[in-house]
Image: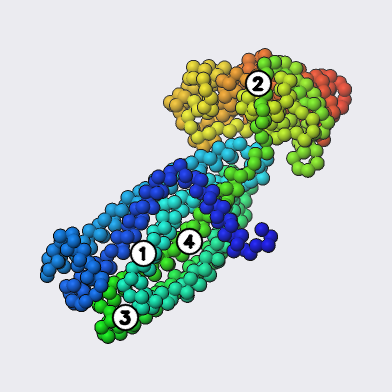
Amino acid sequence: MSGMTPDVVAATTDRRLTGWLAAWVRPYWRRVVLATLLVIAGSALQIVGPLLTAAAIDLYLKPEPGETAARVYRLMGALGLPREGGAGLATLVVAYLLSLLAGAGLLVWQARTMLMTGQLVMRDLRDALFAHLQRLELAWFHRTPTGRVMTRLTGDVEAVNELFTSGFVQIVADLVLLGGIVAVLFSLDWRLALVAFSILPLLILLSTWFRRNARRVYREVRARMAAVNTHLQEHLSGISVVQLARAEARAHAELARLDAAHRDANISGIFYYAVFFPAVELLTAAGLAALLVFGWGWAVGGTLSLGVLVAFLQYVQRFYRPISDLAENYNVLQTSLAAAERLQGLLATPPGVLEPAVPALPPPRRGTFAYEDVWFAYEDECWVLSNMSFVAAPGEKLAVVGHTGAGKSTLVNLLLRFYDVQRGRVTVDGVNVRSLRLADLRGRFAVVLQDVDCFAGSVRDNVSLGRDGVGDERILWALEQVQAHDLLRRLPDGLDTVLGERGAGLSVGERQLVSFARALVGDPEFLILDEATASVDPQTEALIQVALDRLLRGRTALIIAHRLATVASCDRVLVLHGGRLVEQGRHDELLAAGGIYRSLYELQLFARPS
Protein backbone atom coordinates (compact mmCIF):
# COMPACT_ATOMS: atom_id res chain seq x y z
CA MET A 1 0.00 0.00 0.00
CA SER A 2 3.04 2.28 -0.15
CA GLY A 3 1.79 4.01 -3.30
CA MET A 4 -1.74 4.61 -1.98
CA THR A 5 -3.05 7.86 -0.61
CA PRO A 6 -4.12 7.98 3.06
CA ASP A 7 -7.78 8.07 2.01
CA VAL A 8 -7.38 4.95 -0.12
CA VAL A 9 -5.58 3.15 2.69
CA ALA A 10 -8.31 4.21 5.15
CA ALA A 11 -11.04 3.03 2.77
CA THR A 12 -9.28 -0.31 2.29
CA THR A 13 -8.91 -0.68 6.05
CA ASP A 14 -12.58 0.20 6.58
CA ARG A 15 -13.70 -2.44 4.09
CA ARG A 16 -11.51 -5.05 5.77
CA LEU A 17 -12.81 -4.16 9.23
CA THR A 18 -16.41 -4.07 7.99
CA GLY A 19 -15.96 -7.59 6.66
CA TRP A 20 -14.46 -8.68 9.97
CA LEU A 21 -17.38 -7.20 11.92
CA ALA A 22 -19.86 -8.77 9.52
CA ALA A 23 -18.44 -12.19 10.39
CA TRP A 24 -19.41 -11.62 14.04
CA VAL A 25 -22.92 -10.55 13.06
CA ARG A 26 -23.48 -13.42 10.63
CA PRO A 27 -24.87 -15.85 13.27
CA TYR A 28 -27.61 -13.29 13.97
CA TRP A 29 -28.31 -12.25 10.38
CA ARG A 30 -32.06 -12.87 10.79
CA ARG A 31 -32.21 -10.25 13.53
CA VAL A 32 -30.27 -7.77 11.38
CA VAL A 33 -32.54 -8.38 8.38
CA LEU A 34 -35.61 -7.88 10.58
CA ALA A 35 -34.20 -4.65 12.00
CA THR A 36 -33.38 -3.40 8.49
CA LEU A 37 -36.92 -4.13 7.27
CA LEU A 38 -38.32 -2.33 10.29
CA VAL A 39 -36.08 0.63 9.55
CA ILE A 40 -37.27 0.76 5.94
CA ALA A 41 -40.90 0.57 7.04
CA GLY A 42 -40.36 3.28 9.65
CA SER A 43 -38.67 5.55 7.11
CA ALA A 44 -41.56 5.05 4.70
CA LEU A 45 -44.01 6.11 7.40
CA GLN A 46 -41.98 9.28 7.98
CA ILE A 47 -42.39 10.10 4.28
CA VAL A 48 -46.17 9.62 4.44
CA GLY A 49 -46.79 12.37 7.00
CA PRO A 50 -45.95 15.46 4.90
CA LEU A 51 -47.93 14.05 1.93
CA LEU A 52 -51.01 13.78 4.14
CA THR A 53 -50.39 17.32 5.35
CA ALA A 54 -50.19 18.62 1.77
CA ALA A 55 -53.38 16.78 0.84
CA ALA A 56 -55.26 18.16 3.86
CA ILE A 57 -54.28 21.74 2.98
CA ASP A 58 -54.96 21.49 -0.74
CA LEU A 59 -58.22 19.52 -0.40
CA TYR A 60 -59.87 21.06 2.66
CA LEU A 61 -58.08 24.04 4.25
CA LYS A 62 -57.18 26.02 1.09
CA PRO A 63 -58.59 24.06 -1.82
CA GLU A 64 -56.25 24.24 -4.81
CA PRO A 65 -55.71 21.94 -7.77
CA GLY A 66 -52.67 19.77 -7.32
CA GLU A 67 -51.53 16.33 -8.43
CA THR A 68 -50.54 15.26 -4.90
CA ALA A 69 -53.94 16.17 -3.46
CA ALA A 70 -55.70 14.48 -6.38
CA ARG A 71 -53.79 11.24 -5.85
CA VAL A 72 -54.60 11.15 -2.15
CA TYR A 73 -58.26 11.95 -2.94
CA ARG A 74 -58.47 9.05 -5.41
CA LEU A 75 -56.74 6.69 -2.93
CA MET A 76 -59.29 7.60 -0.24
CA GLY A 77 -62.11 6.74 -2.65
CA ALA A 78 -60.50 3.44 -3.63
CA LEU A 79 -60.27 2.50 0.04
CA GLY A 80 -63.89 3.52 0.69
CA LEU A 81 -62.91 6.29 3.10
CA PRO A 82 -64.95 9.50 3.57
CA ARG A 83 -63.71 12.28 1.25
CA GLU A 84 -66.12 15.18 1.65
CA GLY A 85 -65.99 18.09 4.11
CA GLY A 86 -65.05 17.60 7.72
CA ALA A 87 -65.25 13.80 7.43
CA GLY A 88 -62.54 13.83 4.75
CA LEU A 89 -60.28 16.08 6.80
CA ALA A 90 -60.84 13.90 9.88
CA THR A 91 -59.86 10.86 7.81
CA LEU A 92 -56.51 12.44 6.91
CA VAL A 93 -55.91 13.50 10.51
CA VAL A 94 -56.57 9.96 11.74
CA ALA A 95 -54.30 8.56 9.01
CA TYR A 96 -51.55 10.98 10.07
CA LEU A 97 -51.89 9.97 13.74
CA LEU A 98 -51.88 6.28 12.82
CA SER A 99 -48.68 6.78 10.81
CA LEU A 100 -47.04 8.38 13.87
CA LEU A 101 -48.18 5.56 16.18
CA ALA A 102 -47.11 2.87 13.74
CA GLY A 103 -43.73 4.57 13.31
CA ALA A 104 -43.24 4.68 17.09
CA GLY A 105 -44.17 1.00 17.41
CA LEU A 106 -41.74 0.02 14.65
CA LEU A 107 -39.01 2.10 16.31
CA VAL A 108 -39.49 0.26 19.62
CA TRP A 109 -39.43 -3.12 17.88
CA GLN A 110 -36.36 -2.22 15.82
CA ALA A 111 -34.48 -0.79 18.82
CA ARG A 112 -35.14 -3.89 20.92
CA THR A 113 -34.02 -6.15 18.08
CA MET A 114 -30.73 -4.32 17.53
CA LEU A 115 -30.00 -3.87 21.22
CA MET A 116 -30.36 -7.60 21.71
CA THR A 117 -28.17 -8.26 18.66
CA GLY A 118 -25.51 -5.90 19.98
CA GLN A 119 -25.46 -7.66 23.35
CA LEU A 120 -25.15 -11.08 21.70
CA VAL A 121 -22.29 -9.94 19.46
CA MET A 122 -20.57 -8.23 22.38
CA ARG A 123 -20.82 -11.44 24.44
CA ASP A 124 -19.34 -13.54 21.62
CA LEU A 125 -16.56 -11.05 21.00
CA ARG A 126 -15.58 -10.72 24.66
CA ASP A 127 -15.66 -14.52 25.10
CA ALA A 128 -13.41 -14.95 22.06
CA LEU A 129 -11.02 -12.26 23.28
CA PHE A 130 -10.69 -13.80 26.74
CA ALA A 131 -10.22 -17.29 25.30
CA HIS A 132 -7.51 -15.96 22.96
CA LEU A 133 -5.77 -14.09 25.77
CA GLN A 134 -5.55 -17.32 27.75
CA ARG A 135 -3.68 -18.92 24.83
CA LEU A 136 -1.05 -16.19 24.63
CA GLU A 137 2.35 -16.76 26.16
CA LEU A 138 3.59 -15.09 29.34
CA ALA A 139 6.01 -12.90 27.39
CA TRP A 140 3.07 -11.10 25.75
CA PHE A 141 1.59 -10.22 29.13
CA HIS A 142 4.97 -9.09 30.43
CA ARG A 143 5.33 -6.54 27.62
CA THR A 144 1.65 -5.48 27.45
CA PRO A 145 0.27 -3.26 30.26
CA THR A 146 -2.75 -4.74 32.01
CA GLY A 147 -4.63 -1.43 31.71
CA ARG A 148 -4.34 -1.58 27.94
CA VAL A 149 -5.74 -5.12 27.90
CA MET A 150 -8.65 -4.06 30.13
CA THR A 151 -9.39 -1.15 27.77
CA ARG A 152 -9.66 -3.63 24.91
CA LEU A 153 -12.01 -5.95 26.81
CA THR A 154 -14.27 -3.17 28.10
CA GLY A 155 -14.09 0.15 26.25
CA ASP A 156 -13.31 -1.20 22.79
CA VAL A 157 -15.91 -3.96 22.97
CA GLU A 158 -18.50 -1.41 24.13
CA ALA A 159 -17.54 0.88 21.22
CA VAL A 160 -18.19 -1.97 18.78
CA ASN A 161 -21.53 -2.56 20.51
CA GLU A 162 -22.46 1.07 19.77
CA LEU A 163 -22.08 0.32 16.08
CA PHE A 164 -24.75 -2.36 16.22
CA THR A 165 -27.13 -0.68 18.65
CA SER A 166 -27.18 2.80 17.11
CA GLY A 167 -24.61 3.62 14.45
CA PHE A 168 -25.27 0.96 11.81
CA VAL A 169 -29.04 0.95 12.05
CA GLN A 170 -29.30 4.72 12.21
CA ILE A 171 -27.06 5.11 9.15
CA VAL A 172 -29.29 2.69 7.23
CA ALA A 173 -32.39 4.54 8.44
CA ASP A 174 -30.95 7.90 7.40
CA LEU A 175 -29.91 6.64 3.96
CA VAL A 176 -33.34 5.11 3.33
CA LEU A 177 -35.06 8.29 4.51
CA LEU A 178 -32.83 10.50 2.37
CA GLY A 179 -33.45 8.37 -0.71
CA GLY A 180 -37.21 8.41 -0.15
CA ILE A 181 -37.31 12.17 0.42
CA VAL A 182 -35.25 12.87 -2.71
CA ALA A 183 -37.65 10.78 -4.82
CA VAL A 184 -40.74 12.44 -3.32
CA LEU A 185 -39.39 15.98 -3.66
CA PHE A 186 -38.58 15.59 -7.34
CA SER A 187 -42.00 14.03 -7.93
CA LEU A 188 -43.71 16.97 -6.20
CA ASP A 189 -41.80 19.83 -7.89
CA TRP A 190 -38.41 19.51 -9.53
CA ARG A 191 -37.76 23.25 -9.39
CA LEU A 192 -38.20 23.47 -5.64
CA ALA A 193 -36.20 20.26 -5.22
CA LEU A 194 -33.22 21.87 -6.97
CA VAL A 195 -33.52 24.87 -4.64
CA ALA A 196 -33.61 22.56 -1.60
CA PHE A 197 -30.52 20.66 -2.76
CA SER A 198 -28.52 23.75 -3.67
CA ILE A 199 -26.68 23.65 -0.33
CA LEU A 200 -25.77 19.97 -0.65
CA PRO A 201 -22.27 20.60 -2.12
CA LEU A 202 -21.41 22.76 0.91
CA LEU A 203 -22.79 20.12 3.30
CA ILE A 204 -20.76 17.40 1.58
CA LEU A 205 -17.55 19.46 1.77
CA LEU A 206 -18.21 20.21 5.43
CA SER A 207 -18.90 16.55 6.23
CA THR A 208 -15.75 15.44 4.39
CA TRP A 209 -13.62 17.89 6.38
CA PHE A 210 -15.19 16.65 9.61
CA ARG A 211 -14.77 12.99 8.70
CA ARG A 212 -11.07 13.24 7.89
CA ASN A 213 -10.20 15.01 11.11
CA ALA A 214 -12.52 12.95 13.33
CA ARG A 215 -10.82 9.69 12.37
CA ARG A 216 -7.42 10.91 13.49
CA VAL A 217 -8.76 12.41 16.73
CA TYR A 218 -10.66 9.28 17.78
CA ARG A 219 -7.59 7.10 17.43
CA GLU A 220 -5.56 9.46 19.58
CA VAL A 221 -8.32 9.69 22.22
CA ARG A 222 -8.49 5.91 22.58
CA ALA A 223 -4.70 5.61 22.83
CA ARG A 224 -4.60 8.29 25.54
CA MET A 225 -7.42 6.58 27.43
CA ALA A 226 -5.52 3.28 27.38
CA ALA A 227 -2.50 5.05 28.91
CA VAL A 228 -4.69 6.49 31.68
CA ASN A 229 -6.21 3.07 32.41
CA THR A 230 -2.77 1.47 32.55
CA HIS A 231 -1.52 4.03 35.07
CA LEU A 232 -4.63 3.65 37.24
CA GLN A 233 -4.47 -0.15 37.21
CA GLU A 234 -0.78 -0.30 38.10
CA HIS A 235 -0.91 2.24 40.90
CA LEU A 236 -4.18 1.06 42.44
CA SER A 237 -3.08 -2.58 42.47
CA GLY A 238 0.23 -1.49 44.00
CA ILE A 239 -1.25 1.12 46.35
CA SER A 240 0.59 -0.27 49.38
CA VAL A 241 3.94 0.27 47.64
CA VAL A 242 2.91 3.79 46.60
CA GLN A 243 1.91 4.72 50.13
CA LEU A 244 4.95 3.15 51.76
CA ALA A 245 7.26 4.99 49.36
CA ARG A 246 5.27 8.21 49.90
CA ALA A 247 4.98 8.44 46.13
CA GLU A 248 1.38 9.68 46.08
CA ALA A 249 2.38 13.11 44.75
CA ARG A 250 4.49 11.63 41.95
CA ALA A 251 1.77 9.14 40.98
CA HIS A 252 -0.83 11.93 41.00
CA ALA A 253 1.41 14.19 38.91
CA GLU A 254 1.92 11.44 36.33
CA LEU A 255 -1.82 10.80 36.17
CA ALA A 256 -2.42 14.53 35.75
CA ARG A 257 0.00 14.54 32.82
CA LEU A 258 -1.65 11.55 31.14
CA ASP A 259 -5.11 12.92 31.85
CA ALA A 260 -4.10 16.30 30.39
CA ALA A 261 -2.97 14.57 27.19
CA HIS A 262 -6.32 12.74 27.06
CA ARG A 263 -8.14 16.03 27.71
CA ASP A 264 -6.22 17.82 24.94
CA ALA A 265 -7.05 15.06 22.49
CA ASN A 266 -10.74 15.34 23.41
CA ILE A 267 -10.63 19.13 23.11
CA SER A 268 -9.20 18.75 19.64
CA GLY A 269 -12.24 16.64 18.76
CA ILE A 270 -14.58 19.13 20.43
CA PHE A 271 -13.25 21.85 18.11
CA TYR A 272 -14.44 19.92 15.06
CA TYR A 273 -17.80 19.32 16.73
CA ALA A 274 -18.09 23.00 17.63
CA VAL A 275 -17.49 24.05 14.02
CA PHE A 276 -19.41 21.30 12.26
CA PHE A 277 -22.82 21.35 13.92
CA PRO A 278 -23.35 25.15 13.96
CA ALA A 279 -22.24 25.22 10.31
CA VAL A 280 -24.80 22.54 9.47
CA GLU A 281 -27.50 24.52 11.27
CA LEU A 282 -26.50 27.67 9.36
CA LEU A 283 -26.63 25.91 6.00
CA THR A 284 -29.96 24.34 6.94
CA ALA A 285 -31.40 27.74 7.77
CA ALA A 286 -30.10 29.10 4.47
CA GLY A 287 -31.77 26.24 2.58
CA LEU A 288 -35.10 26.82 4.32
CA ALA A 289 -34.90 30.54 3.59
CA ALA A 290 -34.28 29.85 -0.09
CA LEU A 291 -37.27 27.49 -0.16
CA LEU A 292 -39.52 30.14 1.39
CA VAL A 293 -38.39 32.83 -1.05
CA PHE A 294 -38.74 30.78 -4.24
CA GLY A 295 -41.69 28.71 -3.01
CA TRP A 296 -43.76 31.70 -1.98
CA GLY A 297 -43.07 33.39 -5.32
CA TRP A 298 -44.22 30.34 -7.27
CA ALA A 299 -47.21 29.87 -4.96
CA VAL A 300 -48.31 33.48 -5.53
CA GLY A 301 -47.82 32.96 -9.26
CA GLY A 302 -50.16 29.97 -9.14
CA THR A 303 -47.57 27.39 -10.24
CA LEU A 304 -47.21 25.81 -6.80
CA SER A 305 -49.87 24.89 -4.27
CA LEU A 306 -49.61 25.92 -0.63
CA GLY A 307 -49.87 22.30 0.49
CA VAL A 308 -46.88 21.28 -1.60
CA LEU A 309 -44.87 24.22 -0.24
CA VAL A 310 -45.68 23.20 3.36
CA ALA A 311 -44.80 19.59 2.55
CA PHE A 312 -41.48 20.76 1.09
CA LEU A 313 -40.64 22.64 4.26
CA GLN A 314 -41.36 19.52 6.33
CA TYR A 315 -39.41 17.25 4.00
CA VAL A 316 -36.40 19.52 3.79
CA GLN A 317 -36.18 19.72 7.59
CA ARG A 318 -36.29 15.93 7.68
CA PHE A 319 -33.71 15.83 4.87
CA TYR A 320 -31.15 18.13 6.47
CA ARG A 321 -31.45 16.47 9.89
CA PRO A 322 -30.34 13.02 8.65
CA ILE A 323 -27.34 14.64 6.97
CA SER A 324 -26.16 16.06 10.28
CA ASP A 325 -27.12 12.75 11.93
CA LEU A 326 -25.01 10.91 9.37
CA ALA A 327 -22.00 12.93 10.47
CA GLU A 328 -22.79 12.18 14.13
CA ASN A 329 -23.29 8.51 13.35
CA TYR A 330 -20.10 8.62 11.34
CA ASN A 331 -18.40 9.49 14.62
CA VAL A 332 -19.89 6.33 16.13
CA LEU A 333 -18.76 4.42 13.06
CA GLN A 334 -15.20 5.76 13.28
CA THR A 335 -15.01 5.05 17.00
CA SER A 336 -16.29 1.52 16.38
CA LEU A 337 -13.92 0.91 13.47
CA ALA A 338 -10.96 2.21 15.46
CA ALA A 339 -11.94 -0.14 18.31
CA ALA A 340 -12.53 -3.01 15.87
CA GLU A 341 -9.08 -2.44 14.39
CA ARG A 342 -7.48 -2.89 17.81
CA LEU A 343 -9.64 -5.91 18.66
CA GLN A 344 -8.88 -7.55 15.34
CA GLY A 345 -5.18 -6.94 15.92
CA LEU A 346 -5.44 -8.53 19.36
CA LEU A 347 -7.26 -11.60 18.05
CA ALA A 348 -4.73 -11.85 15.20
CA THR A 349 -1.80 -11.90 17.65
CA PRO A 350 -0.33 -15.37 17.24
CA PRO A 351 0.52 -17.28 20.42
CA GLY A 352 4.25 -17.56 20.90
CA VAL A 353 3.79 -21.10 22.26
CA LEU A 354 1.81 -23.25 19.83
CA GLU A 355 0.07 -26.55 20.28
CA PRO A 356 1.82 -29.34 18.34
CA ALA A 357 0.33 -30.05 14.92
CA VAL A 358 0.31 -33.78 15.72
CA PRO A 359 0.43 -34.12 19.52
CA ALA A 360 2.13 -37.11 21.05
CA LEU A 361 0.18 -39.44 23.28
CA PRO A 362 0.69 -38.68 26.98
CA PRO A 363 3.46 -41.02 28.19
CA PRO A 364 3.04 -43.26 31.24
CA ARG A 365 3.75 -41.50 34.54
CA ARG A 366 7.34 -42.27 35.45
CA GLY A 367 8.20 -39.06 37.30
CA THR A 368 11.26 -37.96 35.33
CA PHE A 369 12.15 -34.81 33.41
CA ALA A 370 15.34 -33.69 31.70
CA TYR A 371 17.08 -30.67 30.20
CA GLU A 372 19.26 -31.65 27.26
CA ASP A 373 21.81 -29.01 26.19
CA VAL A 374 19.22 -26.23 26.63
CA TRP A 375 19.93 -22.67 25.49
CA PHE A 376 17.35 -19.95 26.07
CA ALA A 377 17.14 -16.17 25.72
CA TYR A 378 14.21 -13.85 26.32
CA GLU A 379 15.59 -11.37 23.77
CA ASP A 380 17.84 -12.01 20.77
CA GLU A 381 20.89 -14.00 21.93
CA CYS A 382 21.20 -12.62 25.45
CA TRP A 383 21.34 -16.13 26.85
CA VAL A 384 19.65 -16.62 30.22
CA LEU A 385 20.45 -20.34 30.16
CA SER A 386 23.27 -21.92 28.22
CA ASN A 387 24.37 -25.52 27.82
CA MET A 388 21.95 -26.60 30.57
CA SER A 389 21.77 -30.36 31.00
CA PHE A 390 20.55 -32.49 33.90
CA VAL A 391 18.04 -35.26 34.62
CA ALA A 392 15.57 -35.53 37.51
CA ALA A 393 15.09 -39.13 38.60
CA PRO A 394 11.66 -40.47 39.63
CA GLY A 395 10.76 -39.33 43.15
CA GLU A 396 13.86 -37.13 43.44
CA LYS A 397 13.70 -33.85 45.36
CA LEU A 398 15.76 -31.48 43.28
CA ALA A 399 16.68 -28.02 44.66
CA VAL A 400 17.83 -25.12 42.49
CA VAL A 401 19.83 -22.26 44.03
CA GLY A 402 21.76 -19.29 42.73
CA HIS A 403 22.00 -15.52 42.68
CA THR A 404 19.08 -13.42 41.44
CA GLY A 405 19.04 -13.63 37.64
CA ALA A 406 20.87 -16.95 37.54
CA GLY A 407 17.98 -18.58 35.63
CA LYS A 408 16.11 -20.46 38.37
CA SER A 409 12.60 -19.31 37.41
CA THR A 410 13.45 -19.75 33.72
CA LEU A 411 13.90 -23.48 34.33
CA VAL A 412 10.29 -23.64 35.52
CA ASN A 413 9.02 -21.54 32.61
CA LEU A 414 10.63 -23.91 30.11
CA LEU A 415 9.49 -27.05 31.93
CA LEU A 416 5.86 -25.86 31.92
CA ARG A 417 6.35 -24.54 28.39
CA PHE A 418 5.46 -20.93 29.09
CA TYR A 419 8.39 -20.31 26.75
CA ASP A 420 10.10 -22.52 24.16
CA VAL A 421 13.82 -23.19 24.10
CA GLN A 422 15.95 -21.89 21.23
CA ARG A 423 18.36 -24.83 21.33
CA GLY A 424 18.23 -28.27 22.88
CA ARG A 425 15.08 -29.75 24.35
CA VAL A 426 13.18 -30.34 27.58
CA THR A 427 11.54 -33.73 28.13
CA VAL A 428 8.94 -35.08 30.55
CA ASP A 429 8.84 -38.83 30.98
CA GLY A 430 11.03 -39.12 27.88
CA VAL A 431 8.81 -37.02 25.56
CA ASN A 432 9.74 -33.56 24.27
CA VAL A 433 7.42 -31.03 25.96
CA ARG A 434 6.86 -29.38 22.54
CA SER A 435 5.24 -32.63 21.34
CA LEU A 436 2.64 -32.76 24.12
CA ARG A 437 -0.64 -30.90 24.28
CA LEU A 438 -0.30 -28.05 26.76
CA ALA A 439 -3.18 -29.41 28.84
CA ASP A 440 -1.56 -32.86 28.99
CA LEU A 441 1.79 -31.38 29.96
CA ARG A 442 0.67 -28.88 32.59
CA GLY A 443 -1.87 -31.30 34.06
CA ARG A 444 1.07 -33.35 35.39
CA PHE A 445 2.38 -30.47 37.50
CA ALA A 446 1.34 -28.64 40.62
CA VAL A 447 3.01 -25.32 41.35
CA VAL A 448 3.15 -23.60 44.73
CA LEU A 449 4.56 -20.08 44.66
CA GLN A 450 5.67 -17.70 47.37
CA ASP A 451 3.15 -15.11 46.12
CA VAL A 452 -0.16 -16.96 46.04
CA ASP A 453 -2.84 -15.99 43.53
CA CYS A 454 -6.32 -16.32 45.00
CA PHE A 455 -9.42 -15.21 43.13
CA ALA A 456 -12.67 -13.57 44.06
CA GLY A 457 -15.03 -16.47 44.74
CA SER A 458 -15.66 -19.26 47.20
CA VAL A 459 -12.98 -21.23 49.02
CA ARG A 460 -14.21 -24.27 47.14
CA ASP A 461 -13.53 -22.63 43.78
CA ASN A 462 -10.10 -21.44 44.90
CA VAL A 463 -9.04 -24.93 45.90
CA SER A 464 -10.57 -26.89 43.02
CA LEU A 465 -10.01 -24.23 40.31
CA GLY A 466 -12.96 -25.76 38.49
CA ARG A 467 -11.23 -29.07 37.78
CA ASP A 468 -13.48 -31.99 36.95
CA GLY A 469 -13.92 -34.73 39.51
CA VAL A 470 -12.88 -32.60 42.50
CA GLY A 471 -15.73 -32.85 45.02
CA ASP A 472 -16.17 -31.38 48.47
CA GLU A 473 -14.89 -34.55 50.14
CA ARG A 474 -11.52 -34.34 48.39
CA ILE A 475 -11.29 -30.57 48.99
CA LEU A 476 -11.87 -31.04 52.72
CA TRP A 477 -9.35 -33.87 52.77
CA ALA A 478 -6.74 -31.67 51.06
CA LEU A 479 -7.32 -28.80 53.49
CA GLU A 480 -6.95 -31.15 56.44
CA GLN A 481 -3.78 -32.64 54.96
CA VAL A 482 -2.15 -29.20 54.93
CA GLN A 483 -3.05 -28.72 58.60
CA ALA A 484 -5.76 -26.10 57.84
CA HIS A 485 -7.92 -27.05 60.83
CA ASP A 486 -8.02 -23.54 62.27
CA LEU A 487 -8.89 -22.09 58.88
CA LEU A 488 -11.77 -24.52 58.40
CA ARG A 489 -13.15 -23.68 61.83
CA ARG A 490 -12.87 -19.94 61.21
CA LEU A 491 -14.67 -19.92 57.86
CA PRO A 492 -18.24 -18.69 58.56
CA ASP A 493 -19.78 -20.57 55.62
CA GLY A 494 -17.26 -23.36 55.25
CA LEU A 495 -16.29 -24.04 51.67
CA ASP A 496 -18.99 -21.60 50.52
CA THR A 497 -17.20 -18.68 52.21
CA VAL A 498 -16.66 -16.02 49.54
CA LEU A 499 -13.23 -14.42 49.34
CA GLY A 500 -12.56 -10.93 48.05
CA GLU A 501 -10.22 -9.89 45.27
CA ARG A 502 -6.80 -11.59 45.52
CA GLY A 503 -8.06 -13.66 48.45
CA ALA A 504 -9.07 -10.76 50.68
CA GLY A 505 -10.34 -12.23 53.96
CA LEU A 506 -7.43 -14.65 54.36
CA SER A 507 -4.03 -13.96 55.88
CA VAL A 508 -0.84 -14.55 53.90
CA GLY A 509 -0.31 -17.85 55.67
CA GLU A 510 -3.90 -18.98 55.09
CA ARG A 511 -3.61 -18.19 51.38
CA GLN A 512 -0.50 -20.34 51.32
CA LEU A 513 -2.44 -23.19 52.94
CA VAL A 514 -5.07 -22.85 50.20
CA SER A 515 -2.33 -23.09 47.57
CA PHE A 516 -1.01 -26.31 49.13
CA ALA A 517 -4.50 -27.80 49.21
CA ARG A 518 -4.91 -26.73 45.56
CA ALA A 519 -1.77 -28.70 44.70
CA LEU A 520 -2.94 -31.78 46.60
CA VAL A 521 -6.38 -32.17 45.04
CA GLY A 522 -4.96 -32.55 41.53
CA ASP A 523 -2.79 -35.57 42.42
CA PRO A 524 0.19 -34.21 40.42
CA GLU A 525 3.06 -36.28 39.09
CA PHE A 526 5.51 -33.41 39.60
CA LEU A 527 5.62 -30.68 42.22
CA ILE A 528 7.27 -27.29 41.75
CA LEU A 529 7.88 -25.20 44.86
CA ASP A 530 9.16 -21.62 44.73
CA GLU A 531 10.13 -20.89 48.36
CA ALA A 532 6.59 -21.88 49.23
CA THR A 533 6.97 -21.42 52.98
CA ALA A 534 8.84 -18.11 52.95
CA SER A 535 5.75 -16.00 53.60
CA VAL A 536 4.42 -17.90 56.62
CA ASP A 537 5.34 -17.74 60.27
CA PRO A 538 7.49 -20.50 61.83
CA GLN A 539 4.50 -22.17 63.52
CA THR A 540 2.54 -22.34 60.25
CA GLU A 541 5.68 -23.43 58.40
CA ALA A 542 6.07 -26.36 60.80
CA LEU A 543 2.48 -27.43 60.10
CA ILE A 544 2.99 -27.13 56.35
CA GLN A 545 6.22 -29.09 56.50
CA VAL A 546 4.27 -32.13 57.70
CA ALA A 547 1.92 -31.79 54.73
CA LEU A 548 4.86 -31.24 52.38
CA ASP A 549 6.42 -34.51 53.45
CA ARG A 550 3.17 -36.29 52.57
CA LEU A 551 2.80 -34.37 49.32
CA LEU A 552 6.36 -35.01 48.18
CA ARG A 553 6.23 -38.74 48.93
CA GLY A 554 6.46 -40.60 45.62
CA ARG A 555 6.55 -37.41 43.54
CA THR A 556 9.40 -35.72 41.70
CA ALA A 557 9.92 -32.18 42.95
CA LEU A 558 11.75 -29.13 41.66
CA ILE A 559 12.33 -26.73 44.55
CA ILE A 560 13.53 -23.19 43.89
CA ALA A 561 15.23 -22.18 47.13
CA HIS A 562 16.23 -18.70 48.23
CA ARG A 563 16.88 -19.72 51.83
CA LEU A 564 19.60 -22.37 51.58
CA ALA A 565 18.67 -23.84 54.96
CA THR A 566 15.53 -25.29 53.32
CA VAL A 567 17.49 -27.48 50.86
CA ALA A 568 19.40 -29.58 53.38
CA SER A 569 16.92 -32.45 53.06
CA CYS A 570 16.85 -32.42 49.24
CA ASP A 571 18.32 -35.34 47.32
CA ARG A 572 20.36 -33.07 45.07
CA VAL A 573 21.15 -29.36 44.79
CA LEU A 574 21.76 -27.64 41.45
CA VAL A 575 23.81 -24.44 41.65
CA LEU A 576 23.25 -21.98 38.80
CA HIS A 577 25.55 -19.09 38.03
CA GLY A 578 25.31 -16.85 34.98
CA GLY A 579 22.79 -19.18 33.37
CA ARG A 580 25.03 -22.24 33.67
CA LEU A 581 24.97 -25.30 35.91
CA VAL A 582 28.24 -24.92 37.79
CA GLU A 583 27.80 -27.32 40.73
CA GLN A 584 25.52 -30.15 41.78
CA GLY A 585 25.40 -32.60 44.65
CA ARG A 586 24.02 -33.02 48.14
CA HIS A 587 23.99 -30.14 50.60
CA ASP A 588 26.87 -31.42 52.73
CA GLU A 589 28.93 -32.40 49.67
CA LEU A 590 28.67 -28.92 48.19
CA LEU A 591 29.60 -27.30 51.50
CA ALA A 592 32.67 -29.50 51.71
CA ALA A 593 33.65 -28.65 48.13
CA GLY A 594 34.07 -24.97 49.08
CA GLY A 595 32.67 -23.57 45.81
CA ILE A 596 29.92 -21.10 44.94
CA TYR A 597 27.35 -22.96 47.02
CA ARG A 598 29.48 -22.61 50.15
CA SER A 599 29.92 -18.89 49.44
CA LEU A 600 26.16 -18.45 49.09
CA TYR A 601 25.53 -20.41 52.28
CA GLU A 602 28.04 -18.44 54.33
CA LEU A 603 26.76 -15.14 52.92
CA GLN A 604 23.23 -15.96 54.14
CA LEU A 605 24.51 -17.39 57.42
CA PHE A 606 26.48 -14.29 58.39
CA ALA A 607 23.81 -11.95 57.05
CA ARG A 608 21.28 -13.21 59.65
CA PRO A 609 20.62 -10.85 62.53
CA SER A 610 22.20 -11.98 65.80
What amino acid is labelled 1 in the image? Gly
To which residue does mark 1 refer?
A: 180
284 or 46: nearer the viewer: 46
Q: If you read the primary sequence from the N terminus, does the residue marked by circle 3 or circle 2 appear first?
A: 3
Whether label 2 touches label 4, CB < 8 Å: no
> In the figure, 50 relative to 435: above or below?
below
What amino acid is labelled 3 in the image? Gly
342 or 559: nearer the viewer: 342
Could you say which disc has been placed on residue 42 in the image? none
What amino acid is labelled 2 in the image? Pro
Q: Residue at x 48, y 61 (%)?
A: 330
Q: Tag 3's secondary structure?
A: helix
Image quadrant occupied by the N terminus: bottom right
Q: Residue at x 45, y 26 (%)?
A: 496
For mark 1, does the 10 Å Cα neighbourhood hold few (<14), some (14 to 19), or many (20 or more) residues? some
Q: Tag 4's secondary structure?
A: helix
Position in image of residue 584 (x %, y %): 82, 23
Q: Residue at x 41, y 48 (%)?
A: 32
Q: If you read the primary sequence from the N terminus, does the residue marked by circle 2 or circle 1 appear first?
A: 1
Image quadrant occupied by the C terminus: top right
Res 414 → quadrant: top right
To which residue does mark 2 refer?
A: 362
To which residue does mark 3 refer?
A: 295
Q: Residue at x 30, y 83 (%)?
A: 298
Position in image of residue 123 (x %, y %): 47, 42
Q: Tag 1's secondary structure?
A: helix
Res 524 → quadrant: top right
76 or 227: nearer the viewer: 76
Could you say which disc has been placed on residue 330 in the image? 4
